[in-house]
Structure formats: structure tokens, C-alpha cells
Image (cartoon, rainbow, N blue to C red):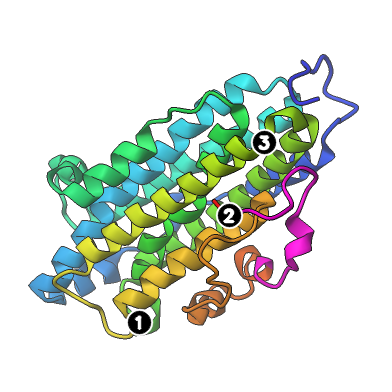
Amino acid sequence: MLNELSTTYKPLRYPQAEEFRLQSEDIHWIVKEVEMTKDLEDFKAASEEEKEFIKNILSIFTQSDFNVANNYLPLIQEIKNNEVRGMLTSFMAREFIHQEGYAHLNESLGFPDSYYTDFLKHQETLEKNSYMATTKHKSFGLKLAKGILLEGVSLFGSFVMLKNYERLGKYLGTCTINEWSLRDESLHVMGNAWLFRTWCKENPQEVNDDFKKAIYEMAREITKLEQNFIDFAMESYTPPKLNRQDVKNYIEHIADRRLLQLGLKPNFNRIVNPLPWMDELNNGSSLANFFEKRVTDYSVAGMTGKFTY
């Protein structure tokens, strides 16, 4: 059981957790690997509207990863199994690398330290941050579900808007950090979704209608906040090859994918990916491969049935 204290390293009760931890360590990266000289040249040559667009994204991105890291703390404290704690700790450590990575982007582009609180000036980013930073749930399962949705949905508007520059041949250092972070987050979501399904199997008494309803409500709220942020970021500037409504629809698509990973049915019915180039640029990443999975691969006992929430 997840809440039983491990007294020795082996035998492993949850070898899958150790596999996720090892994958996390295998794809470890550091900020010094990324060259940002060309990004600074691109930024200096950009229009004022494009500069503001990039600033609006980066102002909340570092803070979002800060919040994601903090969401791991109560989860790690509640888990007593050694290898599962190891998986969560590895995932949390990567979030510090992400913070450093996006801070590196900010500093390479010449933004001052005061810039890290600029998100507080705008309603859309303030509301997004407030929701990410707080939780009302006491259930481990609901706290874990919220963390999965935050990591697997709340970051993806920014991922798309920055990743689009790779198609334009601009900000390639930024795109590299973005790609590596996306790869990490996709692994974290898969590992945490596995943990969620395992927890549900071990705690069937908690998987009731109220539990499922709370997850659907979180998914809808997180999706709405991310779509509001997209509207804010793209209010005065739309990059070439990017359509605001397509990005917002993509967030619904991603939210449905996360619900499927949790063993629930989709809420938005955005099964078809409105931005297929995201998968193409990821070169068959784990995220892209997940989209090829059958829905039944992610259904678990206690989480199947007809849901109308």
C-alpha cells in the first residue's frame, strides 16, 4: 500500500515508480546547455507588439513552474513508500530546473528581477496564479488530480505560443528549453496518472460521485483560466501561423487527454488535435505517443461509467 512505510530499499512494491524515476533522471538537462545569443538578436529585432507578447508569456511561466513544484510537497509528505517518494522527488527536482530555465530566458532578454512579479498586475495571470497556488482539497487523490491537471493543462498555452516560434525559425534557444520542459512535464503527467490510478485501486471507498465531480470541476476551471490567459497574451498580437481559437481548442483537447489518463471520460469532446504540428515538432515524444493510445488503456476500476458532471 502507498501509505505503508518502506523499511528497506528492496523488494520494490511499485517497480513502475522506479521506472518513471529512472526515466526522469535519464532525460535530466541543465540550463547551461542552451545557447541564447540568437534569441537576444531575435528579440532586439522584434516589433514592440511581439516583445510584449513574449513578456506576457514569460512573466507567468516561471511562476507557474514555481507553483507546480510546491504542489509536490504535500504529496511527498503523505506517501510512505520509498520508490514512489523517489519518483515524486525526482519530478519535483525537475521543476526547479524549469524555473531556472525560464528565468534564464528572462535574464538573457534583459528583464529585471522586478519582472518576476509583473503577473500580479493583470487579472488573467493573477487569477491563474492564485488557483495554482491554493488548494481546498484534503483528499490525496484530489490533490494529485489537481497537480496532474495543473502540470498537464495550465502550462500548455505557454508551451504552444512559444513552440510556434520553432516553425518560424526564431528564438531557438527558448524553443529548446520549451521542448525539454514539455518532455519533462509529459513524463510527469504519465507517472502521476499511474500513481492516481494506483491510489484509486487501493482506496475504492473514496472514489465516489463527489470525487469524480470535483475532478471535472477542476478540469473545467483550469481550462477556463488557461483560455483566459491565452486571450490576454494574444489580445494585441497574434504570431504568424498561430490562431487564437485553435490554441484555446487545443487546451480543451489536452484537458480531455488528462481526464482519459485519470480514467475518466472527456469533458469537452475535443478528441481531434487542432494543432497537429505540436506532435510533429515533438518528434514522436511520449506526449504524441499517448494520443495514439486507446481510451481503454487508461480506464481503471472505480473510474469507469457514465459521467454527466
Does the CB distance between marks 3 and 1 fall below 8 Å? no
How many dots with numbers? 3
Tell me: residue 41, above or below residue 111: below
Is 192 left or right of 151, judged from the image as shown?
A: right
For label 2, the residue is: 308
For label 1, the residue is: 169
Residues packed near mark 3 inside 10 Å, few (<14), some (14 to 19) or many (20 plus): few
Which residue is at 17% across, 69% downward?
235
Which residue is at 35% across, 39% downward?
131
Percent x, y for residue 64?
36, 45
Q: Which mark is residue 208?
A: 3
Sequence-earlier tag: 2 or 3: 3
Which residue is at 43% across, 60% downward?
156
Amino acid type shown at disc 1: Gly
Is 52 left or right of 216, judged from the image as shown?
A: left
Tell me: residue 293, above or below residue 101: below
Is 224 left or right of 50, judged from the image as shown?
A: right
Gap in angstroms between the C-alphas marked 3 and 1 = 49 Å
Asked if residue 300 is among those painted magenta in the image, a careful observer would answer yes
